[in-house]
Image (tube, coloured by chain):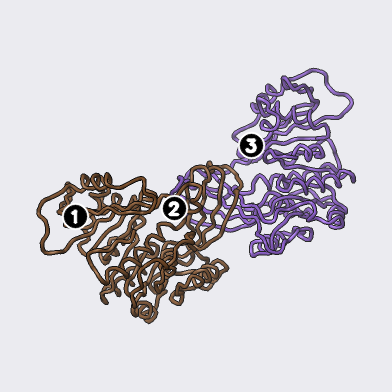
Chain colours: A brown, B purple
Amino acid sequence: MLPWSKISSDSLPPLPENRIVVGVGSASVDFLATVAAYPKPDEKLTSTSSKVQGGGSAANALTCASRLGLNARLISKVADDLQGKSILEELQADGVDTSFMVVSKGGSSPFTYVIVDEQTKTRTGILTPGYPPMIPDDLSRSSLLSALDGARIVYSDVRFIETALLVAQEASCRNIPILVDADYKSEQLGDLLKLADYVVCSTKFPQAWTEAPSIPSALVSMLLRLPNIKFVVVTLGEEGCIMLERSVNEDLPTEEIDIDSLLELLMQKTDDSITFPTFVPSSVAKLRANKFGTVHGRLIVGTAEKIPPLELLDTTGAGDAFIGAVLYGILNYSNFNKDVFFIC
Amino acid sequence: MLPWSKISSDSLPPLPENRIVVGVGSASVDFLATVAAYPKPDEKLTSTSSKVQGGGSAANALTCASRLGLNARLISKVADDLQGKSILEELQADGVDTSFMVVSKGGSSPFTYVIVDEQTKTRTGILTPGYPPMIPDDLSRSSLLSALDGARIVYSDVRFIETALLVAQEASCRNIPILVDADYKSEQLGDLLKLADYVVCSTKFPQAWTEAPSIPSALVSMLLRLPNIKFVVVTLGEEGCIMLERSVNEDLPTEEIDIDSLLELLMQKTDDSITFPTFVPSSVAKLRANKFGTVHGRLIVGTAEKIPPLELLDTTGAGDAFIGAVLYGILNYSNFNKDVFFIC
C-alpha cells in the first residue's frame, strides 16, 4: 500500500496501551502508469512501466498507522469485484482491520489512474469513484458502535463526507478526538470541520477555504472559524509543513505579532544543510492576521527529509503516510504532555 | 467492441463465398474515463463517467469486419487474467475467431486508459502493453498455417511487427494480399510495408515516413518506394480520407498533373451540404510530386458522414472500423471489377 518500506516502529517510543484509530474515507486501487512525457490531448502513447497497488487517502493513512503499531480500523466501501478483493487483502496484509468495510454486491470498486511523468516528476491522478457510492445507511448503527468501541481517535478524509459526518457526530458525543484530512473543498466539509479537533490540509486548501492572502493568515482564519480546533497543519510537499497550534494556557502574552512576519523569521532559522527532518517552533504569542483577527498560539515550521533525486522512487501516498504519523503522534505524545508534541 | 451499433450488412451487396480475413495486432481492454476538463500535471480530479470496453486496432477492425459478415480470425496475445478473459469473450460475442490467440500464463493483458475530455472532445490514450510481449515464437508453424488456410486477405496493425512480418511473409508466398494499418513509424515497419498490397495510414504517417511537404506528395512517394502497393489511403478524421490508387493499364496518359493541384481541384468538387459520405475520383493521370517523381494512378477524395455534435457519442475505434470496411470492400468488390472499388 505504501511505498515507504522504511516506516517501522523500531526506533519509536513505546506505544500507549489503548491505541485504536478509526478511519473513514477512500480505499481504492491505484494504477500507476509511467510515461516519458506528459500526454498532450489527443495523443496516443505507450507507458514505459506500470504498477498496480492499493491507494486511497484513508487506506494509505491507516496502513501507515498500522505499520507504526496502532490498531487501525477502516470504514470504507468497495465492490465484490477483483479490485475490491485486492484492496481488502492488501489492507489485511498490513494489519488494518477491514471488518467495518462495506462490500457491495455488483458495482465497481474505486479506481485511480496515476500518470507518472518521468521528465517532470509530476503525478496526475484521475479517480473513478466506486459504484454505488457509500451512503450513511451503508453503516449500521451496531457496526458504527463496534467500530468506535475503545477508539482513541477518529480520522476522516473528505471522500464519503456524509458517512464521515455520521461517524464524527457519534465520536464527538463520546469525546473521541477527530482529525480531518482537508484535501479539497467540498459541500458539507464545513460541518465536518466544526466537529474536528485537528486538521491536516493540502497546500492549497487553507487559502481556498478562507480566501486569505497567505497561508499563515489562512491558518489564523481557520482557528478563528473553528474554535474547537487544537491545531492545523498544512503540508507543503518537499518544503515540509507549517503548523499553527492554539494555546489555552492562562498566562497568555498580550503583545501581537504579525503571523506572516513570524513565518519569515522561522523560515530563516531552518538549516538547509541538514538532510533529516527538523522543526522550528515559535514561542506562544498573540498571532495577528490582518482582516481576520488574532489567536493565541505558536507557529511551527517543519522541514522534510532531503532525499537525493536518484533515491526518490515514489511519492505516491506520502501525504497520507504523513497523516498516519500525525495520528501516531497524537496518540503517543498527548498522553504525557499535552503541550509538547510534534511528529515531523 | 465497437461503438457503431449502426454497422450491419443488411444494406450491402451479397458476400463472396470465400471471405476469410486474418488479422494480426493489438487486442486490449480500454478504460474510458470522461473528465470535465483535461487534467493539468499534478492535478487530482474525478471522472464524471467511465466505461470499460474491448479495444486495440486489430481487434476493433476485425470486429467491424465480422459484423459486416466476413469470417475474421485474430492473431494477438493476452494474458490469462480477468482482462484477457473479457477481451476474448467480447471478440467471440462479435463472431471473431479467437482460436489463434496466444494466452500467456501469468503476466498481464494490454490495457489502454483513454481520457475523454468533455470540453474539447479530445481522446488521449495511454497504452500499457501486455506482458510478456508477443514474439514470433508464440505462433507455432501449424497454428500459422491453419490461420492462413483459405484466407483471402491478411491485415496487420503495427503492434506486434515481428509476428506480423512472419505472417505476412507466409501470406506473400501464398499470394494472399496484405493490408497494413500504418498508424505510426516504427522499426521494421518498412519491411512489413514492402510486403503490403494495400496501406491505410493515419493523418500524420505519410509525411512522417516520407518527409514530403504535403500529404498528396507523400502518397506519391509511398507508391514510388513501395512498388507492390495497389493503393494507399490516408484517414483524416471528420475530414474524410484521401486515396491514391495505382493504375497498371496499358494505355496510360502521358500528360503530367501536379498532385497537390489535383487534390485542390477535387476538394472544390466536394459538396459540404451533403451529410452522407461521398467520394470524388480523378481520372487516371500521370501524377507528379516535385522532388519525388511521378506515378500513374488516380486520386480519390472521400468525405465523412456529417454527424451533428449532439448525436456524436463516441469516436473510439472509428479509424479501426474504417479499416474493417476497407477489408470488406477489397474482398467484396475486387472479385468482379478490379478497377472499380471504393468503400467510403
Distance from label 1 to label 3 (Cα)? 68 Å
Label 2 or label 1, whichever lies nearer to me, is 1
Which label's residue is closer to the chain start, 3 or 2? 2
x then y, percent, for residue A250: 11, 64
- Circle 1 Cα neighbour tier, 10 Å, few/some/many (<14 / 14–19 / ≥20): few
The type of residue carrying mark 2 is Leu
Whether residue B280 sits left or right of residue A15 in the image: it is right
Question: Which chain is home to disc 2?
Answer: B
Q: Are marks 2 and 1 in contact (CB under 8 Å)?
A: no
Residue ID at (71%, 44%): B158
Residue ID at (83%, 29%): B247
Please tell me the numbered disc located at residue B236.
3
Distance from label 3 to label 2 (Cα)? 32 Å
Question: Which chain is home to disc 3?
Answer: B
Label 3 or label 2, whichever lies nearer to me, is 2
Vertical placement of residue A107 versus B223, above or below: below
**SS class of the residue under badge 3?**
loop
x then y, percent, for residue B226: 80, 32
**SS class of the residue under badge 1?**
loop
Residue to which mark 1 is pinned? A283
Distance from label 2 to label 1 (Cα)? 39 Å
The type of residue carrying mark 1 is Ser
The type of residue carrying mark 3 is Leu
Q: Quadrant of the N terminus of chain B?
A: bottom right
Residues flagged by tags 1 and 3 on a common chain: no
Residue to which mark 2 is pinned? B45
